[in-house]
């Protein structure tokens, strides 16, 4: 082995033989080893020093200061439990509360240096991947709420608990799921993503559990499985997923053979699943199984501080992707960008800026780049507030407005769904789903 100067380790224990044994094996990889007797002293050290790893015994924790308290308070420091009286239950609790490793001090201390070398390599990879994620998806923020979300993601990444990300469509929930994966001990294994709303029930189950080939659960073994829009799956699929989560075993379609799986489950939804449970359209036991930890992602309209950097970020990205150089933006187009409500959140902001860049004239973004929906509000029969005889929910108002607009666009394209989807900057599948949802197919006036 060789010395790695940048590894800083703190051993917390008041037993001389415990400390000497660890110092002996750890000195093979680092000279930066500090020791203190208890957590009160350790916390004082944390005020002035940075530690990559803390190694301590399980019995030093109690109800007043738990493993979860430590891992959430110091997310940048990995906790390793070297237990003098190891037990399966203690190990399970430690790992679920965010400990990086739980080892038998009497048997596994010799293997610890090699494990730390592997973890240190993971940390280097983690830093690079985190930097790439922040640069590629503009995760830097000035908004307090979003900064707390990022901090929460880092804290929960170390636990084995199932995580549910809630928030409106387009707020970046999948990116945050990737961030959690990168911050977790599973970084060296796969991150597998599945969009639940894009499949029929049979196709979804085949993709999840596998048939002739591996399903998403098997592919994500020892890694992270992200199920996007989990609120859209049927009761039957919920029941099958619940069994997998309870048993940690999965069987492929038409097979009795069970395969053991260990993956971190992160789910997301834009639905109010609690209401779905109350209405009987969602299993209560499954709901509580997937939401051990809930993280609420704020909509873009609540992140006014971040709008400027997001606009600049997507402008540069769109210019690079389209090979177009933008030199100026007309005041009307700029005012629109900074005052629009972005009901589609970050996804809609990106689509709008792509449109503006593509429709720019001689390097100048003009009012013609403003989305068609905004420009033609007077031309289409969007329900007006004054036309309502009673107050309806904002959700119902938006639904009526969207239905009217989609009907208008389909009429302009002569009922050509593919062309309408292209102009709307959405997939044909999404548009077909909307047509079915709003039952507007029968009312489309097709042009000859």
Image (cartoon, rainbow, N blue to C red):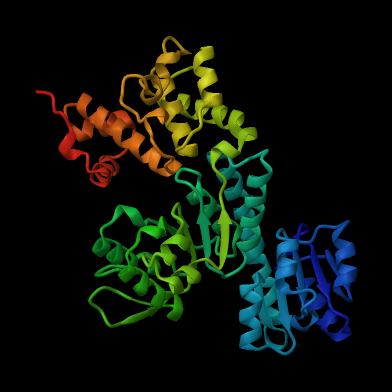
Q: Residue at x 32, y 19 (%)?
A: 379
Q: Is residue 199 left or right of residue 102?
A: left
Count of numbered marks: 0
Q: Nearer the viewer, residue 307 or 127?
A: 307
Q: Is residue 119 left or right of residue 364?
A: right
Residue 181 in sight from this viewpoint:
yes
Quadrant of the image occupied by residue 354: top left
Give the vertical position of 338 relative to 401 (above or below): above
Q: Nearer the viewer, residue 111 or 215?
A: 215
Residue 329 in sight from this viewpoint:
no
Give the vertical position of 293 relative to 249 (above or below): above
Give residue 22's position: percent from left, percent from top: 79, 78
- Position of the C terminus, as image quadrant, is top left
Quadrant of the image occupied by residue 368: top left
Give residue 122's position: percent from left, percent from top: 61, 60
Q: Nearer the viewer, residue 119 or 72?
A: 72
Give residue 107's position: percent from left, percent from top: 68, 87
Q: Is residue 444 left or right of residue 448?
A: right
Q: Residue at x 30, y 66 (%)?
A: 205
Quadrant of the image occupied by residue 70: bottom right
Toward the top, the furthest residue is 362
């Amino acid at each position: 082995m060789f010395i790695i100067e940048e590894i800083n380790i703190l051993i917390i224990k008041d037993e001389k033989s415990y400390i000497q044994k660890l110092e002996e094996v750890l000195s093979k990889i680092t000279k930066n080893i500090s020791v203190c007797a208890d957590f009160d002293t350790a916390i004082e050290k944390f005020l002035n020093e940075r530690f990559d790893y803390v190694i301590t015994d399980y019995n030093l924790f109690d109800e007043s200061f738990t493993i979860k308290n430590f891992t959430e308070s110091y997310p940048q420091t990995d906790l390793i439990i070297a237990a003098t009286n190891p037990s399966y239950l203690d190990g399970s609790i430690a790992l679920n509360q965010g400990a990086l490793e739980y080892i038998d001090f009497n048997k596994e201390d010799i293997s610890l240096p090699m494990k730390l070398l592997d973890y240190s390599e993971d940390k280097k990879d983690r830093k690079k991947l985190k930097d790439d994620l922040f640069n590629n998806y503009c995760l830097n923020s000035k908004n307090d709420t979003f900064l707390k979300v990022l901090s929460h993601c880092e804290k929960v990444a170390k636990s084995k608990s199932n995580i549910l990300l809630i928030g409106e469509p387009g707020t970046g929930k999948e990116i945050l799921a990737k961030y959690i994966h990168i911050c977790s001990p599973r970084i060296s294994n796969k991150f597998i993503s599945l969009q639940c709303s894009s499949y029929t029930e049979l196709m979804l189950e085949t993709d999840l559990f596998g048939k002739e080939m591996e399903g998403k659960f098997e592919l994500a073994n020892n890694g992270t499985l992200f199920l996007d829009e989990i609120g859209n799956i049927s009761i039957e699929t919920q029941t099958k997923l619940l069994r997998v989560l309870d048993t940690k075993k999965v069987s492929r379609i038409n097979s009795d053979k069970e395969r053991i799986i260990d993956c971190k489950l992160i789910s997301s939804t834009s639905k109010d699943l609690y209401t779905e449970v109350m209405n009987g359209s969602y299993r209560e036991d499954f709901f509580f199984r997937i939401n051990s930890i809930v993280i609420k992602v704020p909509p873009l309209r609540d992140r006014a501080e971040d709008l400027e950097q997001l606009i600049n970020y997507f402008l540069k990205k769109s210019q690079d992707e389209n090979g177009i150089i933008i030199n100026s933006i007309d005041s009307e187009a700029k005012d629109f960008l900074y005052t629009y409500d972005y009901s589609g959140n970050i996804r809609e902001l990106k689509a709008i800026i792509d449109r503006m860049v593509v429709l720019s004239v001689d390097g100048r973004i003009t009012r013609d780049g403003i989305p068609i929906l905004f420009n033609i509000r007077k031309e289409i029969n969007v329900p007006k507030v004054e036309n309502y005889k009673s107050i309806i929910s904002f959700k119902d108002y938006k639904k009526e407005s969207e239905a009217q607009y989609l009907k208008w666009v389909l009429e302009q394209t002569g009922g050509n769904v593919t062309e309408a989807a292209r102009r709307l900057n959405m997939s044909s599948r999404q548009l077909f789903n909307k047509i079915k949802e709003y039952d507007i197919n029968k009312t489309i006036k097709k042009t000859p």
